[in-house]
Image: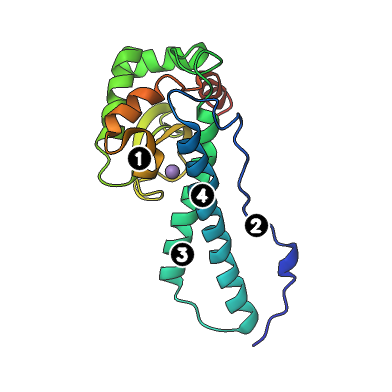
Amino acid sequence: MIVMMATASLRKYELPPLPYAADALEPYISKEQLSLHHDKHHQAYVTGANAGLEKLEKARQEGTEVDMKAALKELSFNIGGHVLHSLFWPTMAPAGKGGGGTPGGALADRIDQEWGSFDRFKAEFTKTAASVEGSGWAALAYCNMTNRPMIMQIEKHNNHIYPSFRILMVLDVWEHAYYIDHRNNRAGFIDAFWNVVNWGTVNKRFENL
Ligand code: MN
């Protein structure tokens, strides 16, 4: 059966621009590292997500079978990558101009309540990022059932994500996030990251839950 669909009007994923200049996070993240990460790696997930959708749309139009398990696995990988990178860029800001330091506002109080101190939270988040096996992310998320913030470790882009948890802050620890600046030294990259965390954005996400 051939189904006629106006697929041209269906929305596609788009690469969001960086919310700052590509060299704005130096010296903590170099222009070359950030440009490649955003322009090439993030773009690849956007392209992959759209290609995955188009594959499904084409099969629907032609009435052909799709290996749904394989198609959806690939789609969740690419969409997960796109969503997490889209959260990642605004999670950072130039050091001293919104980036670095410690959180304020309501978020600071909740971190103290949950972890006892910011230093304890920072240590747990750092360990979470450092101990990702292979490629993945550390995230600060929020559970709507308990109303508690939680640290989440994400494998690849899409594994170990808790459904419906809102993500407040993410750190990408795929090698492509740091190999130009730090070679194989992930810990060096995590240290650098703390200098550019945009606590204002993270706090806003928390207040807007
Ligand atoms: Mn990445």
For the point 50% across and 19% down, the residue is 199
Q: CA distance from mark 3 to mark 4?
A: 23 Å
Tag 4 or tag 3, which sits nearer the N-term?
Answer: 4
Numbered circle sitting on residue 92: none
Which callout, 3 or 4, points to the residue nearer the camera?
4
Q: Are marks 3 and 1 in contact (CB under 8 Å)?
A: no
Give the percent coordinates (x, y) of residue 131.
Answer: 24, 36
CA gap, disc 4 and disc 1: 14 Å
* Mark positioned earlier in the residue sequence (3 or 1): 3
| Disc ID at residue 40 | 4
Which of the 4 image quarters holds residue 127?
A: top left
Residue 72 numbered tag: 3
Q: Ligand 1 lies in which image quarter? A: top left
Q: Pick the quarter of the image with the N terminus.
A: bottom right
**Mark toward the start of the polypeptide (3 vs 2):** 2
Q: Amino acid at mark 3?
A: Leu
Label 4–label 1 contact, CB within 8 A: no
Q: Which residue position holds label 1?
A: 179
| Residue 135 shown left or right of residue 3 in the figure | left
Which one is nearer the viewer's eye here, 93 or 138?
93
181 vs 79, nearest the viewer: 181
Q: Nearer the viewer, mark 3 or mark 1?
A: 1
Q: Residue at x 49, y 77 (%)?
A: 66
User: Which kind of residue does numbered mark 4 sit on?
Assistant: Lys
Q: Secondary structure at mark 3?
A: helix
Say how many tags the image has. Answer: 4
Q: Earlier in the sequence, mark 4 or mark 2?
A: 2
The residue singled out by tag 2 in the image is 12
Would you place residue 17 above or below residue 58 in this image? Answer: above
